[in-house]
Amino acid sequence: MRNIKLTLEYDGTEFVGWQMQANGPSIQEELERALHQILGENVKTIVAGRTDAGVHARGQVVNFRTASAVDPDSLTRSLNGVLRPEIVVLSSEEVDTQFHARYSAKARLYRYILMTRPTALMRNHSWYVGGYTLDIELMGRCAEMVRGEHDFASFCKSDSDVDHRRCVVSRAEWRFLRPTLEFEIEANRFLYGMVRAMVGTMVEIGRGYRAFDDFEKILAARDRTKAGMAAPAKGLFLERVIY
Amino acid sequence: MRNIKLTLEYDGTEFVGWQMQANGPSIQEELERALHQILGENVKTIVAGRTDAGVHARGQVVNFRTASAVDPDSLTRSLNGVLRPEIVVLSSEEVDTQFHARYSAKARLYRYILMTRPTALMRNHSWYVGGYTLDIELMGRCAEMVRGEHDFASFCKSDSDVDHRRCVVSRAEWRFLRPTLEFEIEANRFLYGMVRAMVGTMVEIGRGYRAFDDFEKILAARDRTKAGMAAPAKGLFLERVIY
């Protein structure tokens, strides 16, 4: 069996998320349907990062095993011909049989996009934070505090089924490209709901709804109820998976 | 009567264009409905550039007369509260009674966005030109040739009802920000279908379907049948109107 790696871009707006669910179309279901159509096989995909409903990807990675002799470049074109336009295969390649989209990943990079004015063109691809000004400098200091290795239980949905909640954050920064405000975070792993909980909390601090000193306490508390509201899914993008 | 100027951003995907038509929702209709709802008046808007079905705007300008004493900033907020999310008012201001969104405009700036790879996130906001490489240098030389004052009849839909087809192009250039390719053009006026016909023709030259020398002949011919196919509406943005 050959092992094929796909890199995907998708618009999560109309999907229930990566994973198959009874209540609507998932990215996984649509991709596996397209793979079945092209390869004539029932393919089971392994994904690098399961994204929630409404979350987008610019560089999601998937792998699957196949008995087919299909050429990777023609697979890319064939898939793009049958997939819904909200999902695009950026590249396909044959990889080592040991390659596992999830376990082989060294790091993932997420980006969160805020808009400081209302937007029509980016309405499904950003969170409009209106009605108050944000203290970007304080938000930048929060970002500094999440760098390094920490237990991020305070930023993890409590029903998450993992044995520990330690992550090593190699990059975390806010960038203001007026009227867009971007948060970029790279870590070896991400907990369920982690980026959205962080962004929501930092925005609460940036707008003065919470004191800056709270951030350190929240991080130390290891208790999700201490953190702020999750930022909406539509501003979040899985940018890249690093192997 | 006061004269109010609005600057708008909109996503043209779901609209029949700026102008009211029987076959679907128009931007004008939706804006005038919202103005009626807020002001309690039947307002007639004047627009800087009538955009076609599927064409977007980042800085469309409109003006209208009103007997209302409404404060411009609260008008912006109120309109954004009742407009469909595909249309956003970026700003409102009271202007001189002589101001006319169309006739007072000195220039308009349009941008056309091409993608050189398939895209999910930009699928309604760009034209994917796939399956061939583009000679960007040749396309840049075509752009140079449209600068200055010319009769652009070859790039104007023949049913267009104007007394002459001369336009002064103050800026025209291609920029390659891989994988995005952008064409920017600023002129004192634009003819119906002009940017899309130009982009379509330059792409035909860039992909080698037409010879570069044809471009000069097409421009000189003043005959729409000589030019190439119109590029799709979804890649076109009215960026800014200059007064």
Image (spheres, coloured by chain):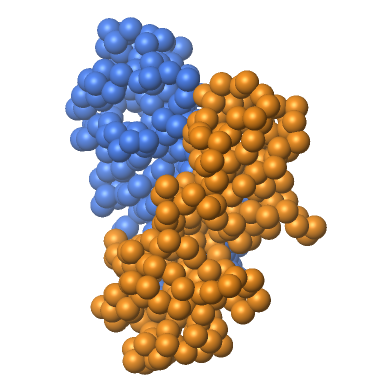
Chain colours: A blue, B orange
Callout count: 0
Vertical relation: A90 (above or below) A211: below
Q: A43 left or right of B43?
A: left
Vertical relation: B11 (above or below) A210: below
- Of B86 and B70, nearer the camera is B70
Please say whether residue A91 is visible from this viewpoint. no
Residue B48: x and y, percent? 54, 51
Residue A232: x and y, percent? 50, 30
Residue at point 58%, 58% (across, down): B51
Residue at point 41%, 63% (across, down): B187
Vertical relation: B49 (above or below) A24: below
Residue B49: x and y, percent? 55, 55
Residue A188, by quadrant, is top left
Residue at point 54%, 52% (across, down): B102
Please say whether residue B108 is visible from this viewpoint. yes
Residue B98: x and y, percent? 54, 41
Residue B83, by quadrant, is top right
**Rendered-image quadrant of the N terminus of chain A:** bottom left
Residue at point 71%, 37% (across, down): B43
Residue A222, by quadrant, is top left
- Of A177 and B173, nearer the camera is B173
Extreme right residue here?
A: B22
Vertical relation: A151 (above or below) B92: above
Q: B55 left or right of B136?
A: right
Q: A215 left or right of B66?
A: left
